[in-house]
Image (cartoon, rainbow, N blue to C red):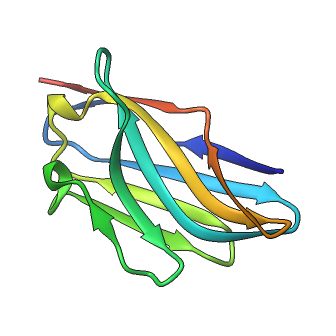
Amino acid sequence: QVQLVESGGGLVQAGGSLRLSCAASGSNFRIETMGWYRQAPGNQRELVAAIPSSGSTNYADSVKGRFTISRDNAKNTVYLQMNSLKPEDTAVYYCNLLGRTSGLLRRYWGQGTQVTVSS
């Protein structure tokens, strides 16, 4: 079993910055991809950014140039640096891990952290 613990959400004014962190713990698992999704009220959950074990990155068009995803493999931790935040970035942000446990590919979710951007 894998547990994900997120931190770093909060309230910020438009144009400000926040940094989200997500640490994975557990036993006998191998991380394939870590990423961040978000869900605003009334909207579907959407991919924000992802970083596979290769280190390449993938971003939603709406955050390109403003958000940066990175990971520390030694700490099993993924980060999301969010700059130039806009009110439309307001959402619950969920950490996501795609990994292998006992040879099976599984997806895990964090509990979510609220990000609120005021205008």
59 is higher (above) or lower (below) than 38 = below
Residue extending furthest toward the bottom: 54
Foreground residue among 36 and 98: 98
Q: Residue at x 44, y 69 (%)?
A: 51
x and y, in percent, of residue 99 in the image: 66, 64
Q: Residue at x 17, y 60 (%)?
A: 64
Visible residue check, residue 112:
yes
x and y, in percent, of residue 25 in the image: 78, 57
90 is higher (above) or lower (below) than 64 = above
Q: Residue at x 50, y 32 (%)?
A: 113
Residue 115's quadrant in the figure? top left
Foreground residue among 69 and 60: 60
Residue 9's quadrant in the figure? top left
16 is higher (above) or lower (below) than 56 = above
x and y, in percent, of residue 17 in the image: 27, 47
x and y, in percent, of residue 63 in the image: 19, 52
Q: Locate the C terminus and report the quarter of the image it occupies.
A: top left
Is residue 40 toward the left or the right of residue 84 in the image?
right
Q: Residue at x 51, y 70 (%)?
A: 71
Visible residue check, residue 8:
no
